[in-house]
Image (cartoon, helix red, strand yellow):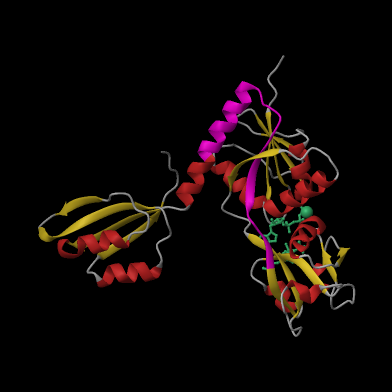
């Protein structure tokens, strides 16, 4: 029997699509995803990429139709709660939370409404695409409400007289502001996440998943890290090192024809902000270079 290729479901188009492809390509998968096909073969590894609506990804993983999926935790938790309520399979394993797709599911009301906590919504109608996440939150508050399911344009529901409030995704808040609404409670914080089916994989495919995960961890670690090079006076070296966020012990090198100053090289596990660079300069550091890291292992 030929070995079954590993199947990974990602969003076909939308907010997560490009980042998913960048991540997989960064992990070494050679993909040609320019055409419209549902299923694409990875050219250098026994992996197939399935490109679908994001709403379908949790179910495909929970039913064991695909082995891995990348999806927003908001969509994943909504599907899990719905399946749990229906006594349908809702198991999966989270391999890792990813560094993109950050957003929150929030309650929002007319900006002029006086807000006095969730009780303000007692007996009111809330429009949402996430009825299970909303119900799970409202149950904890004990406030009775009714809902109105809208798959899109949720933000116009109050103005259209369809609902008194909304429960929708927020990132910058621009959509709420443009619709005369204000965010009042965050009910769920979400990022994209990599999940695996609960059905056991063949030993070969599990090895491939483990390898892929190590590489993905490396890609994300590299994205979150910077290589820093600078020259610093020996007199302020300790203060300079203390300013470098998350850095392991730096390399200190002598400078030619300069006994007062040294060169410092360090990998910082956090973004180096302008403020920190200005503080480094104030300590006498010069030639401060912050370089991106392409790959990282170990
Ligand atoms: N404003 C936002 N900022 C950041 N991430 C977001 C934002 N809105 C949504 N997301 C995340 O991206 C995911 C996909 O959003 P998108 O708008 O592409 O979904 P969609 O329209 O349902 O797509 P599909 O056609 O695949 O069903 C969301 O489920 C959420 O996790
Ligand atoms: O707080 P903001 O930065 O404005 O983002 C929030 C908006 O982003 C998402 O919609 P998207 O723009 O993906 O369009 P959609 O409604 O077609 O999904 C979400 O449904 C909100 O409407
Ligand atoms: Mg969708």
116 in the magenta segment = no
What range is drawn magenta here? 186-215
Does residue 16 sit above or below 27 in this rendering?
Answer: below
Residue 193 x %, y %: 63, 47
Q: Is residue 127 left or right of residue 288?
A: right
Locate ligand 1 by image quadrant.
bottom right
Q: Quadrant of residue 228?
A: bottom left
Q: Quadrant of residue 34?
A: top right
Could you tell me if residue 13 is visible in this image?
Answer: no
Residue 125 x %, y %: 86, 70
Query: Which residue lies most toward the front here?
Result: 142
Residue 29 x %, y %: 58, 37
Residue located at (65% from left, 61% from top)? 103
Residues 77 and 115: in front is: 115
Q: Is residue 129 left or right of residue 267?
A: right
Residues 281 and 241: in front is: 241
Does residue 42 sit above or below 268 in this rendering?
Answer: above
Could you tell me if residue 205 is visible in this image?
Answer: yes
């Amino acid at each position: 029997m030929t070995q079954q290729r590993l199947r990974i479901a990602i969003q076909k188009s939308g907010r997560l699509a490009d980042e998913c492809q960048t991540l997989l390509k960064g992990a070494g998968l050679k993909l040609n995803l320019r055409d419209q096909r549902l299923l694409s073969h990875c050219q250098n590894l026994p992996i197939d990429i399935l490109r679908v609506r994001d709403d379908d990804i949790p179910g495909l993983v929970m039913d064991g139709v695909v082995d891995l999926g990348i999806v927003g935790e908001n969509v994943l938790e909504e599907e899990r709660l719905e399946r749990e309520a229906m006594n349908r399979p809702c198991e999966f394993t989270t391999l890792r939370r990813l560094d993109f797709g950050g957003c929150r599911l929030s309650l929002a009301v007319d900006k002029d409404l006086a807000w006095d906590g969730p009780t303000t919504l007692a007996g009111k109608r809330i429009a949402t695409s996430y009825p299970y996440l909303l119900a799970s939150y409202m149950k904890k508050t004990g406030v009775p409400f009714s809902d109105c399911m809208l798959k899109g344009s949720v933000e116009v529901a109050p103005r259209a007289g369809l609902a008194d409030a909304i429960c929708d995704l927020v990132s910058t808040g621009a959509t709420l502001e443009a619709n005369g609404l204000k965010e009042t409670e965050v009910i769920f914080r979400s990022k994209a996440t990599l999940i695996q089916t609960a059905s056991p994989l063949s030993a070969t495919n599990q090895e491939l998943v483990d390898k892929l995960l190590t590489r993905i961890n490396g890609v994300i670690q590299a994205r979150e890290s910077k290589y820093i090079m600078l020259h610093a006076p020996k007199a302020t070296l300790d203060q300079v090192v203390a300013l470098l966020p998350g850095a392991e012990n730096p390399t200190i090198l002598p400078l030619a024809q300069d006994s007062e100053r040294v060169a410092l090289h360090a990998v910082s596990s956090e973004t180096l902000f302008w403020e920190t660079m200005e503080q480094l300069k104030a300590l006498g550091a010069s030639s401060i270079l912050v370089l991106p890291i392409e790959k990282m292992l170990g």
